[in-house]
Image (cartoon, rainbow, N blue to C red):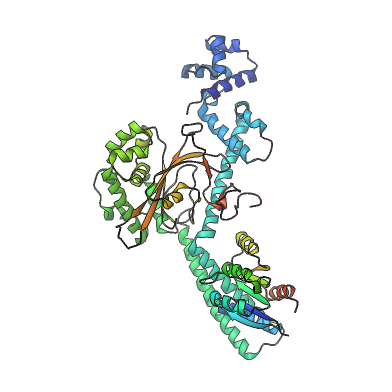
Amino acid sequence: MQKRVLVIEDEPNISEALRFILSRNGWRVEVSADGKAALGSLSADPPDLLILDLMLPGVNGFDILRQVRAYDDTRTLPVLMLTARGQAADRIEAERLGVTRFMTKPFANADVLATVHEMVQT
Amino acid sequence: MPRPALTGTRIRARRNLRGLRQAELARAVGVSPSFLNLIEHNRRKVSPQLLEALAQALAVSADALIEETDGRLIEGARAAAQRSEADLAELERIDEFTGRFPGWAKVLAETQGRVERLERVVESLNDRMTHDPYLGEALHEIISAVTSVQSTASILTDSEEVDPDWQARFHRNIVQDSARLAEGAVALVNYLDTAQSDEAGLAAPLEEVEAWLTRLGFHLPEIEQGRVDADAMVQGQVELASDASRALAQQWITRFAADAAALPLAELTAALDETGLAPEALAARFDVPFDKILRRLALLPETCLRDAGLPPLGLVICDSSGTMVFRRAVEGFRLPRFGGGCPLWPLYQALQRPLVPLRKVLVTAGRLGRRYLTYACAAPVGSLTYDGPVALHATMLVAPLAVGGADTEAEPVPVGASCRTCAQLDCIARREPSILVAGG
């Protein structure tokens, strides 16, 4: 069965590129630019993987990650955080909140695919 | 603060170094051996004439024997030692070290000073990278555009065939992001070019006002003379380069003028001579709010403070959000350029208890551990209404305390400038790791 990934990213051109490379890699890709709206659907119908931007308008990536880890249905959901902020403090905070993997932008497509593959055996 | 004890110790160390007996040196300078013995054991003060004679007999400069010069060396060596994790049992012999090896002590003190200066640069740059909102947003915008271009270009150059519709879409995205990248880069370069007008960058109106007041020594003579034309006072001031900074400067001039009118210079300095640094007594005597007296004291001419036996004073004012809206730094008590300060400053605690005056002794964490006596109070600004919002300004006066000076009854609270650069790792109020400490 096709695995499903939710990409929460407010930069449309980045999420479009992610949608393309992941789709081509066999994933069913859903994209949301609105973290608050995405949170509702996450617990109702959890994907197999969440790719999460840190800097989002309104609810930021840390807030979303905190909620994801609080819900029973998504407590163990693999989460890949992609961020333009590569500061150690952000990485430490993401790890404290239970992120599975942390990657900084700009990223190589091949690295994203390899990381995703490691996180969820497709 | 006089420390004759150090002078006596140094005289003894120098005499021993030259292999002179106490009686020989006493004879050479024309005093009795017993009197020299008392001096060397720090039980008698040394007159300037005798100090000169002793220096001549010991073939050193008088400076090498008096406290002022060696005090700096001792403080520098002590600061360096406090950074070390090595066994510091020898720290108690620091006088002997600086007395016997003044050259090495000077090297150590200078190195320590350089480390501290470099740390301040790191702190400033880190503050800027971390908290300057414009810089943060500009860099985020550029990195996002670069990410999109890189990822999209990589897709297009892949060997796998890309559907023509997707190709067209990706080409359009690359054109968009390239334009965005170019605009972002130009804006960033312009911003950094402007910022280079100052060593650390004048990034905001508040900083322009600070630079202006710093040049003036935080003192505006027109205010003391009652000739206040705020509009005229801000014209032609090179630091006040923007309309925003001039408007801000006018607000402060108006506020300081009101403070000066309520607390005239001559009367205040006379009262200060009597009370010393006692804002509560001064506020009662002049029947003015506590925060007004704090502002006024910090902006008195340094000559007035010196005449009253006081050092230059620092002042920090923040609004209800904790954002600093006025800063006057004081030696050793660092104030972050961006973002919040140390949560343990009474400045922030005052916000929780408006109109209640606070008094705390603070000690800077790590390093030299300098102590400061601080007073703080928060008060409403603007007109109060029954149902409208209440805006507060908290004001904190910072007075350096002499080493070993008074006001030691209270246990000092260890504080930093901001968590990023604070060495107090186990602080209850820490909000992020420190960059200056290994493992932070």
Outermost residue toward the bottom in this view = B164
> Horizontally, is A69 left or right of A1 in the view?
left
Residue at the right extreme of this rendering: A121
Q: Is residue B348 visible?
A: yes
Image location (x, y in percent) of residue B344: 50, 48
Residue B198 rendering spot, x and y as whole percentages:
46, 54
The image shows residue B101, relative to residue B316, as above or below, that is above
The correct choice, above or below, for B414 with respect to B272 in the image is below
Near-viewer residue (B198 or B433): B433
Locate residue A26: give its quadrant: bottom right
Picture quadrant where residue B432 is located: bottom right
Camera-side residue: A17 or B269?
B269
Which of the 4 quarters of the picture holds residue B7?
top right
Horizontal side, residue A79 vs residue B56: left or right: right
Q: Is residue B95 left or right of residue B284?
A: right
Residue drawn at x 40%, y 58% as measured from the top left: B205
Labels in figure, total:
0
Residue B173 picture location, percent across and down? 57, 81
Image-based side of B78 in relation to B297, left or right? right
Q: Residue at x 32, y 63 (%)?
A: B387
Q: Is residue B122 visible?
A: no
Above or below residue B162? Residue B55 is above
